[in-house]
């Protein structure tokens, strides 16, 4: 017949296993949280770069548009040459009107 562990010893071992299990779970959760944070940072940087590029393109089109207007070019000619859409044209005109 096998020797049985005393109840107190069993309780201690179960407590130790529970603590170690909680520690392992917490470690996994912390690693996953850090991984998700890094993913979010990368996504934010990508979105920021994209937004900056788009703003830069619109500013360039605005400068070109202004220069063409200074040379008395017609708006439809400017649109044809630059590829500025009607929506972009409206935005540009609003910007120019506020300036």
Image (tube, grey):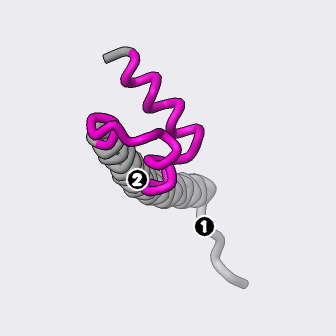
Alpha carbons under labels 2 and 1: distance apart: 65 Å
Label 2 or label 1, whichever comes before in sequence order: 1
In percent of the image, x 38 and y 44: which residue is there? 58
SS at mark 2 in the image: helix
Residue 96 counted in the magenta span = yes
Residue 96 percent across, percent down from the top left: 37, 23
Residue 95 magenta-highlighted:
yes
In terms of depth relative to the viewer, which is nearer, 61 or 41?
61
Dot 1, crowdedness within 10 Å: few (<14), some or many (≥20)? few
Farthest residue, direction bottom: 1
Q: Which residues are magenta?
A: 68-97
Where's residue 70, x and y in %? 27, 35
Q: Which disc is residue 23 wearing? A: none
Q: Is residue 58 left or right of residue 11?
A: left
Visible residue check, residue 41: no
- Which residue sits at x=36%, y=50%? 57
């Amino acid at each position: 017949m096998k020797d049985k562990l005393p109840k107190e010893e069993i309780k201690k071992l179960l407590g130790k296993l529970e603590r170690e299990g909680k520690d392992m779970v917490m470690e996994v959760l912390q690693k996953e949280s850090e991984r998700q944070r890094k993913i979010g940072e990368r996504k934010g940087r990508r979105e920021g770069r994209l937004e900056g590029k788009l703003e830069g393109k619109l500013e360039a089109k605005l400068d070109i548009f202004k220069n063409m207007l200074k040379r008395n070019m017609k708006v439809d000619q400017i649109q044809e040459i630059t590829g500025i859409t009607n929506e972009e044209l409206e935005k540009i005109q609003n910007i120019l009107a506020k300036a």
